[in-house]
Image (tube, helix red, strand yellow):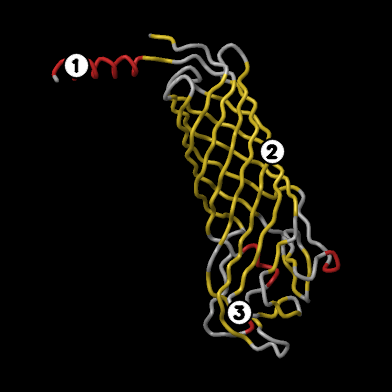
């Protein structure tokens, strides 16, 4: 038993002393949680008293979110002798959601009632950018990067009972109109090299989702069962809505895969 303990200890020392040559290609598969920022965390009006002033407005439906779950895949191509500079390509699926109670009109008489409301907004982001890896040949490799992203919106809005929205009775969920916005992503994290082929990664992304491409569709361009994003200043039903900012901060963890790296090198 004593010899086995010594052998295991020697093996651990050997592994800890190993360093790896930088890989040509790195792939991260990640998942995590985040927080909506900007107007995407607008509070649902209070449910007491049940008044018209506290009614949930359809123009705000996409902005009543509170939670964020994300799944992503990031590919990184290293350049140069040291491999510090990288071109990055990312695909991230962001699911913004909330489950709460809200005041709604329930009939053509504009009577009000409180019911369950579940807004769900999905943003598929496809990003291209650059990154600087500080220690690509070490087992612990911090990195910082940034990129431009095309963000594709979709979603669904569910109610606990029949409600009246946009002048019509709704007995089922409403859909979010498909929209596209151009954004910017800032990314920072640490890649832990566990072997020449596999590692673990942890990081944070700050996503400015709609700095470019804001819009507000004419009501005639929105389907009868659709809600549009409406993030550009506009007037609807006599109310003026200002420009809206959509952003988020996402924490993530995941698995790294390395390709094109030479064999392990001993110190």
Residue labelled with disc 1:
6
Q: Left or right? Give the position of 254 relative to 88.
A: left
Spatial CA span between label 1 and label 2:
52 Å
Density class for disc 2 (Cα within 10 Å; few <14, some 14-19, many ≥20) is many
Residue labelled with disc 3:
161
Please report whichever mark, 1 or 2, sits nearer to the chain's N-terminal start.
Answer: 1
Please report whichever mark, 3 or 1, sits nearer to the chain's N-terminal start.
Answer: 1
Spatial CA span between label 3 and label 1:
68 Å
Tell which residue pokes out farthest to the bottom in this image. Answer: 109
Q: Is residue 213 above or below residue 28?
A: below
Frontmost of labels 2 and 3 is: 3
Q: Position of residue 19 (x, y in %)?
A: 42, 15
Q: Left or right? Give the position of 32 relative to 223.
A: left
Q: Which residue is at 58% across, 67% downward?
A: 118
Corner quadrant of residue 182: top right
Looking at the rendered image, the quarter that the C terminus falls into is top left
Where disc 1 sits, the SS reads helix
The reply to whether callout 2 and callout 3 are in contact (CB within 8 Å) is no
The reply to whether callout 3 and callout 1 are in contact (CB within 8 Å) is no
Looking at the rendered image, the quarter that the N terminus falls into is top left
Residue labelled with disc 2:
148
Numbered tag placed on residue 107 in the rendering: none
Density class for disc 1 (Cα within 10 Å; few <14, some 14-19, many ≥20) is few
């Amino acid at each position: 038993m004593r010899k086995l303990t010594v052998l295991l200890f020697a093996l651990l020392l050997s592994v800890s002393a190993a360093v790896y040559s930088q890989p040509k290609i790195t792939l991260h598969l990640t998942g995590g949680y985040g927080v909506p920022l900007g107007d995407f965390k607008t509070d649902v009006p209070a449910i007491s008293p049940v008044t018209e002033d506290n009614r949930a407005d359809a123009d705000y439906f996409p902005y009543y979110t509170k939670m964020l779950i994300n799944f992503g895949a990031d590919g990184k191509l290293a350049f140069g002798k040291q491999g510090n500079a990288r071109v990055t390509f990312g695909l991230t699926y962001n699911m913004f959601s909330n489950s709460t109670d809200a005041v709604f009109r329930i009939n053509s008489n504009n009577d009000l009632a409180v019911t369950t409301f579940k807004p769900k907004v999905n943003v598929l982001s496809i990003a291209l950018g650059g990154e600087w890896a500080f220690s690509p040949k070490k087992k612990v490799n911090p990195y910082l990067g940034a990129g431009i992203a095309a963000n594709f919106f979709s979603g669904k809005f569910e109610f606990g009972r029949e409600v009246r929205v946009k002048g019509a009775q709704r007995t089922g969920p409403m859909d979010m109109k498909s929209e596209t916005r151009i954004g910017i992503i800032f990314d920072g994290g640490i890649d832990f090299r566990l072997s020449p082929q596999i590692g673990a990664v942890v990081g944070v992304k700050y996503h400015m989702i709609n700095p470019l491409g804001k819009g507000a569709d004419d009501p005639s361009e929105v389907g009868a069962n659709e809600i549009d994003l409406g993030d550009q200043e506009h007037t609807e039903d006599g109310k003026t809505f200002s420009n809206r900012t959509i952003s988020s901060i996402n924490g993530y963890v995941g698995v790294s895969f390395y390709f094109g790296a030479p064999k392990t090198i001993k110190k």
